Image (cartoon, rainbow, N blue to C red):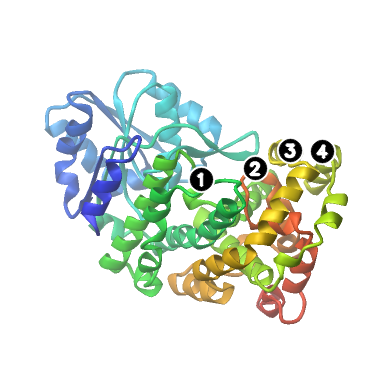
Amino acid sequence: MDYERIDAALRQASDTRRVVIGVKTLDGVDATFADSFGERAAVVIADETTFAVAGQAVHEHLRAAGRTVFAPIIFPSAPALYADFENVLVLETQLRQHDATPVVVGSGTLNDLTKLAAYRAERQYMCIGTAASMDGYTAFGAAITKDGFKQTMTCPAPRALLADMEIVAQAPPQMHATGYGDLLGKITAGADWILADALEAEPIDDLAWSLVQDSLRDWTAQPDRVRVGDHQAVGHLFEGLIMSGVAMQISASSRPASGSEHRFSHLWEMEALGHNHPAIPHGFKVGIGTIAAAALYERVLTRYLDQLDIDALCAQWPSCDETERTVRAMHDLPLLAENAVAESLAKYISPQQLRTRLQMLQARWPQIRSKLQAQLMTANELRAKLQAVGCPTEPTAIGLDMDQVRASYARARTIRARYTVLDLVNETGILDACVEELFTPGGYWFEHAAVLV
């Protein structure tokens, strides 16, 4: 754990001022709380599992220090808590009954619910991390589903984060695996940012890029050790997740940590929610989304995109009305279709703007291609890492068949305005050909289809 690097990053962060990671750190929770919130009252938020793991100890340490501590807010552990807006409102209502600072004990869903509820209740909060399961601990914004559509809602990261690595390392292996899947997805997210920067859609923030990408391969180098709860390997994973969150704070965007792999993941999550399918851990969906994105990149990198027929591509470029009709027809869930139309139109470019972008691509493709090759891993390399950590690598494991995976390459592009490889293949007219190659002999999904029978 590179504590000096974490502290240096926090000096540039917008929200988080204190991160304490170590062994037996719960014993000093009141001192950490006091550094950020002074003499304010506190209230612990947890579910039944995280309260037993660490929440009760946090509550007792705060109370033993003489601090005013309100009765804990404890959600049931079953059925699984979901990060939806209705639960945010429930928590906000409880927080407004007093002026205590929330101290959430847990990881993904609990943190996101508390982050947004605390913001709506006009107060900051503290987080006690219990697992290396996601990058949202220190992230700007909360991933919340509202009206069937998952979106990142604006709200600040925690003022303080504390984690006891003995507790984190002892979390269930599935939680390590989902965090690893989320972190490994920064490989393709980085490639997408390279594209967006080169084509002047969204410039790279050098500091945010460095915080995530400089050590990414080191943080993800030992998936087998992460799987068995090795303290050092889990510590590297946790550090990577924390730094990803800080990078999002610095850039005030999820761009440093989220690209096409998250477009797949969010699409699958929203479709599953709309059809009342069981929830799948976020990092598992991101892991398979990362494979899907990397496989697409492999097909793109075989193309000579410096030899495009720009006149033909611009001539056949759809109008706004045609785009709306096409996007709406892709989605059978009305709310998802409405949001997909809004996101697609937000990034719509005119034929002349397309011409400008394609001319840039044509002139810069050799350099872009070289950068992408240096950034990416192959789909098979990613698959091996995910298997080693215990992540599913087969779409059937997250409730998808091959027809759904195939259709996702077109649908996933529509649900966010952010520029990724999914937009590149659409604008260059190679989407259908690339996807066809993935599902025919020699293609990634064809070669792994036998596993799915």
- Res 383 seen here: yes
Query: Which residue is under mark 3?
Result: 345
How far apart marks 2 and 3 lie (CA) works out to: 8 Å
Task: Say whether marks 4 and 3 touch (CB < 8 Å).
Answer: yes
Residue 332 seen from this side: no
Between 437 and 231, the one nearer to me in the picture: 437
First in sequence: mark 2 vs mark 3 = 3
Select label 3 or label 1 by which is in front: 3
Residue picked out by circle 4:
320
Say left or right for 65 vs 418.
left
Mark 1 or 2 closer to N-term? 1
Looking at marks 1 and 4 on the same chain, the residue that comes earlier in the sequence is marked by 1
Q: Which amino acid does label 2 sit on?
A: Ala
Q: In the drawing, does residue 351 fall left or right of residue 145?
A: right
The Cα–Cα distance between marks 3 and 1, rounded to whole angstroms, is 37 Å
Q: Quadrant of the N terminus?
A: bottom left
Above or below, 155 relative to 131? above
